Image (cartoon, helix red, strand yellow):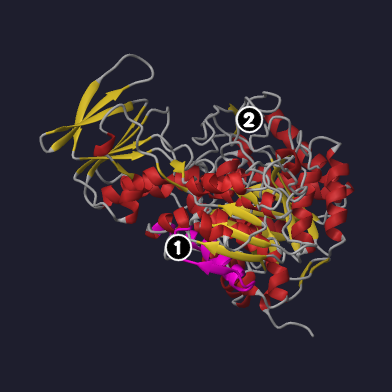
Amino acid sequence: MASNDPLLQPYQLKHLTLKNRIMTTSHEPAYPENGMPKDRYRAYHVERAKAGVAMTMTAGSAAVSKDSPPVFNNILVYKDEVVGWMKKLTDECHNHGCAVMIQLTHLGRRTHWNKGDWLPALTSSHQREPAHRAFPKKMEDWDIKRIIGDYADAAERMAEAGLDGIELQCYGHLMDQMLSPFTNELDGPYGGSLENRARFALEVLAAIRARVGDKLLIGMRYTADEVAPGGITEEEGIAIGHMFKASGHVDFLNVIRGQIHTDPAMTDVIPVQGMKSAPHLDFAGRIKAEVGMPTFHAARIPDVATARHAIASGKLDMIGMTRAHMADPQVVKKIIEGREDDIRPCVGATYCLDRIYQAGDALCMHNAATGRELTMPHDIVPAAEKKKVVVVGAGPAGLEAARIAAERGHAVTVFEAAAQPGGQVRLTAQSARRKEMIGIIDWRMAQCAARDVEFRFDTWAEADDVTSLNPDVVIIATGGLPHTDVLEGGNDLVVSSWDLISGDVKPGSNVLVYDDAGDHAGLQAAEIAAKAGAKVEIMTPDRSFAPDVMAMNLVPYMRSMQDKDVTFTVTYRLTSVAKDGNQLKAVIGSDYMPLAKEKHYDQIVVNHGTLPLDELYFDLKPQSVNLGEVDYDAMLAGKPQVVNGGPKDGFRLFRIGDAVSARNTHAAIYDALRLVKDI
């Protein structure tokens, strides 16, 4: 029976029939190898194709020219060898009824010269992009001619690979740099008036269409409003849309609002948790209504209800749910099967994008199989032999272990000392801006409940409690506790970041947050103190503060604290603390030179990660078959653990997450997945 769900209706885009209204928009997960979309890259897109997404848009973006250095580990479509790899990806996605497009670009100034072939970045001015810091060459006439030809060559390669279409990146990259009054300082036919600034984009379109004819669909993902005085306005954005339509070469628009030249600007275009969902949806709907072209859009559309509204209201023709599909590639499949409640939620952590902007690969905070499709399953296979599994700890590691063990068909019992599940994630979610993180826990609790996992809360498990259940496998996921005993003296005078976040300790009025971990907890504690009216100093011995928070997640912290009495001090080390009347005297040193200066505060917060809560593990270790040993070679090869050496009639014992060492939520969940999937 045909569905009446707006999201599941087919859409006819020129000669291409899209089977539903959900797509993943172009993004660069940084999985290419030497610029080629090889097996890992292909497996990532195929996983979403086979689960029902109508179209997967690859690359974010693919570089058409050698002087567009691959700062995001971009696909290099200026190389002929890309054709075979893209054809293989396209053919496999087509086998699942999924259309494939690719986004083509020249990065312009949004890159750096010390990548790729070390050619200078270039754009329509000498202005440096703040985010990437390269001082660009100002384009010459021969550059313009050459790059237009590069676009046409790249499009021809994609046609040869059998793709359904291409999208041209016209926001933040060279095409948009030419369009924007902020960055176009050219004279003559490519500078000045809007018509001149749009000339480059229109000539690229004409060159591509002349080369490939109607074989490929062509779209423009473009900035229709820069939301900044002196930039592209809404009215100009509408006019640009009409120019694209009038060219006769554009088949769809993909609407962007804002700029991406700084971390704050990027975060307003692609919001993180704690920010408004779908902030530009109404604007995209206006562009569709004013220009009258097929219109796509994506910007924090994390849930099915919002996506359904976007289509049902006629604001969009296709909705992009890109980060949502990183969290759960089976979004469409679960909608079709009436299992929307089973969709693993995107919690807006933006671990995926922040890793890319630190030259890493995209990973989902709480789906460790994303990007690891060649080695990690999204679907858990039932075990041949059913076992009794005991998990101690109901944080993200323990709950992921319990979920997977239950999906394998094992009988699972979970001990948790607290009254509620969540561990450090529940602590993190105490901050209103990060409350969505609790979705990591809530989803796993629902999955465990559906599989009859037994929970024993308010239970501090001892060795006898565990062994009395006669388990086959015991997994210790007890996490850790704050490590504040790190100073030469005065450790008893400090409090932990957890103390402030939990509310167990109230902020002082003059607070030092000594952050030697560089993660969210330090900045969360500082934010709480600043909002309470305290004078706050955040100090780190590192050369930059909070490196593990990363770029886009740093933005809301700065917006929360920069208008308050907060200072940041780098490259200084807190060595000791002593009482001095009703104040605390901090002795501050440096790793760079002999130094001992003193400052006074009324509260000192130390953020230095956690120490494993591992007593139970060591109590149980002598009774275990494997004496707690993990065969790393077997684990990495996806094989069961068979290490022996302990009592023959014992249980297998493992520990995961922060019960091993202080890391992060993703690491804890990955520990659980790659170990328990083979138990």
Q: Is residue 283 above or below residue 267?
A: below
In this view, the residue in front, 658 or 106, is 658
- Pinpoint residue 602: horizontal percent, then vertical percent: 18, 40
Quarter containing the N terminus:
bottom right
Disc 1 crowd rating (10 Å Cα; few below 14, some 14-19, many 20+) is: some
Magenta residues (range): 433-461
- Pinpoint residue 206: horizontal percent, then vertical percent: 77, 48
- Pinpoint residue 674: horizontal percent, then vertical percent: 69, 49
Can residue 370 be seen here? The reply is: no
Disc 2 crowd rating (10 Å Cα; few below 14, some 14-19, many 20+) is: some
Can residue 86 be seen here? The reply is: yes
Q: Is residue 497 above or below residue 590?
A: below
What residue do we see at 29% from left, 17% from top? 595
In this view, the residue in front, 44 or 266, is 44
> Which amino acid is tagged 2?
Met
In this view, the residue in front, 241 or 262, is 262
Q: Which residue is mark 1?
A: 459
Total tally of numbered discs in the picture: 2
User: How far, Cα to Cα, is label 2 from label 1?
Assistant: 68 Å
Q: Look at the numbered disc 2 and give the secondary structure of its residue.
A: loop
- Pinpoint residue 96: horizontal percent, then vertical percent: 84, 63
Numbered badge on residue 139? 2
